[in-house]
Image: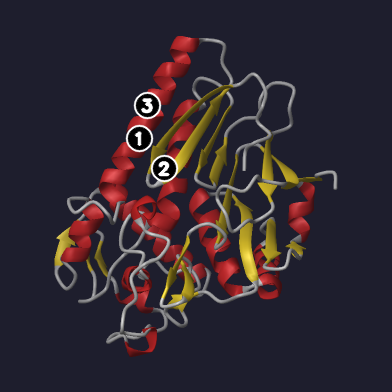
């Protein structure tokens, strides 16, 4: 989403949380940039160690293993979980952090780079899962703020990956901003600090969706971001074949199955990274018309793109957009 950043800004790229992380900082001091980038990479490593569902010794894995029992969690884990539960309420459950078992049933049971594009077939269809999806089940998570302890219902599994990258990027930008104007792209979750000198914002391109990660990107619009967050949720990249059917990682909480709306990507700008990600996911699940309506009602800039290339903008998005030449 950031191919338009071809200016003189210092940049750094690395992998974390199963995604490409890109960092831009406006500074002429190489030593300062190196120190800042190293701090960002350490921060992402810390978040991954706490929240990865693919690391057996992560805090998230321990919490899920202890479902049915009280467990004391770190302050960072508590804060992220609290944000997730607030957003589940705000989206009326269309964003749901308790869908780990459904993701695993769909075949997303390992880091995506290790996930074969052809996951082995299984004999158990979604309709025969022992524990069907129940509405608003995140409300059954018990919390004891005084002890900073939580208890998941037995059999429940948390997946906080949907918002963790954005929260981490947001934290990193708060540090980077001490050195200058900055931007972080954490696999589609973008957080912008102050704009670069002589710019109203950081130029960020939204590309036309493609089913192939190797296909060249075609920019649709350019957004100008300053002290803002942007998240894109999509089914165009993280997908795989199973039982002759195309699966992806966006689960519809109402069915427990991969979402089957007419939207292929949803891009949302919000005051916080967690809210941007939650509403990007929720609007993608709802589909082009209902998703755009909900975003507009929330007062959020948003852009949804359908399977056949149709686009739906919220009125708030037009203030950020510069259309690419077509």
Q: Residue furthest bottom?
A: 128
Residue 80 in the image: state x and y as whole percent. Answer: 37, 53
Which residue is depicted at the point 59% across and 25% down? 181
Marks 1 and 2 in Cβ contact (< 8 Å): yes
Task: Work out which quarter of the rendered image holds the N terminus and state it.
Answer: top right
Q: Which residue bears the numbered disc 1?
A: 43
Element type where label 3 sits in the image: helix
Q: Quadrant of residue 168?
A: top left
Which residue is depicted at the point 52% across and 68% down? 90
- 20 or 86: which is nearer to us? 20
**Vertical placement of 41 versus 32: above or below?**
below
**Vertical placement of 275 versus 5: above or below?**
below
Residue 281 in the image: state x and y as whole percent. Answer: 53, 64
Element type where label 1 sits in the image: helix
**Vertical placement of 235 versus 203: above or below?**
below
Residue 147 seen in render = no
Q: Which mark is residue 39?
A: 3
Residue 94 seen in render = yes
| Spatial CA span between label 3 and label 1 | 6 Å
Marks 3 and 1 in Cβ contact (< 8 Å): yes
**Dot placed on the residue nearer the N-terminal end, 3 or 2:** 3
Residue 106 in the image: state x and y as whole percent. Answer: 38, 72
Q: Quadrant of residue 297?
A: bottom right
Badge 1 crowding class, 10 Å Cα cut-off, few under 14, some 14 to 19, many 20 or more, is: some
Q: Which residue bears the numbered disc 2?
A: 168
Residue 303 in the image: state x and y as whole percent. Answer: 70, 58
Which residue is depicted at the point 55% across and 63% down? 235
Badge 2 crowding class, 10 Å Cα cut-off, few under 14, some 14 to 19, many 20 or more, is: many
Q: Quadrant of residue 4?
A: top right
- 143 or 164: which is nearer to us? 164
| Spatial CA span between label 3 and label 2 | 12 Å
């Amino acid at each position: 989403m950031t191919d338009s950043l071809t200016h003189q800004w210092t940049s750094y790229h690395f992998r974390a949380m199963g995604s490409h992380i890109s960092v831009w900082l406006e500074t002429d001091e190489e030593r300062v940039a190196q120190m800042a980038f190293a701090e960002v990479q350490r921060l992402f490593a810390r978040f991954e160690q706490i929240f990865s569902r693919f690391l057996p010794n992560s805090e998230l894995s321990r919490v899920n293993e202890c479902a049915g029992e009280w467990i004391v969690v770190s302050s960072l884990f508590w804060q992220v979980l609290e944000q997730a539960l607030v957003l589940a309420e705000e989206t009326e459950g269309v964003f749901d952090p308790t869908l780990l078992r459904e993701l695993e049933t769909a075949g997303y049971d390992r880091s995506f780079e290790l996930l074969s594009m052809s996951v082995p077939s299984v004999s158990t269809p979604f309709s025969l899962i022992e524990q069907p999806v129940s509405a608003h089940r995140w409300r059954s998570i018990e919390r004891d703020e005084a002890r900073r302890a939580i208890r998941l219902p037995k059999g429940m599994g948390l997946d906080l990956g949907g918002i963790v990258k954005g929260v981490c990027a947001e934290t990193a930008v708060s540090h980077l901003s001490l050195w200058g104007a900055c931007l972080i792209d954490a696999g589609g979750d973008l957080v912008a600090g102050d704009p670069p000198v002589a710019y109203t914002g950081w130029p960020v391109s939204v590309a036309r969706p493609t089913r192939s990660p190797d296909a060249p990107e075609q920019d649709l619009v350019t957004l100008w971001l300053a002290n803002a967050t942007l998240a894109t949720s999509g089914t165009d990249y993280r997908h795989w074949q199973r039982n002759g059917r195309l699966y992806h990682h966006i689960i519809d909480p109402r069915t427990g199955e991969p979402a089957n709306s007419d939207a292929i990507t949803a891009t949302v700008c919000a005051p916080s990274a967690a809210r941007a990600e939650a509403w990007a996911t929720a609007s993608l699940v709802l589909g082009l018309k209902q998703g755009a309506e909900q975003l507009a009602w929330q007062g959020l800039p948003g852009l949804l793109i359908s399977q056949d290339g149709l686009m739906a903008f919220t009125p708030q998005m037009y203030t950020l957009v510069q259309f690419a030449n077509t």
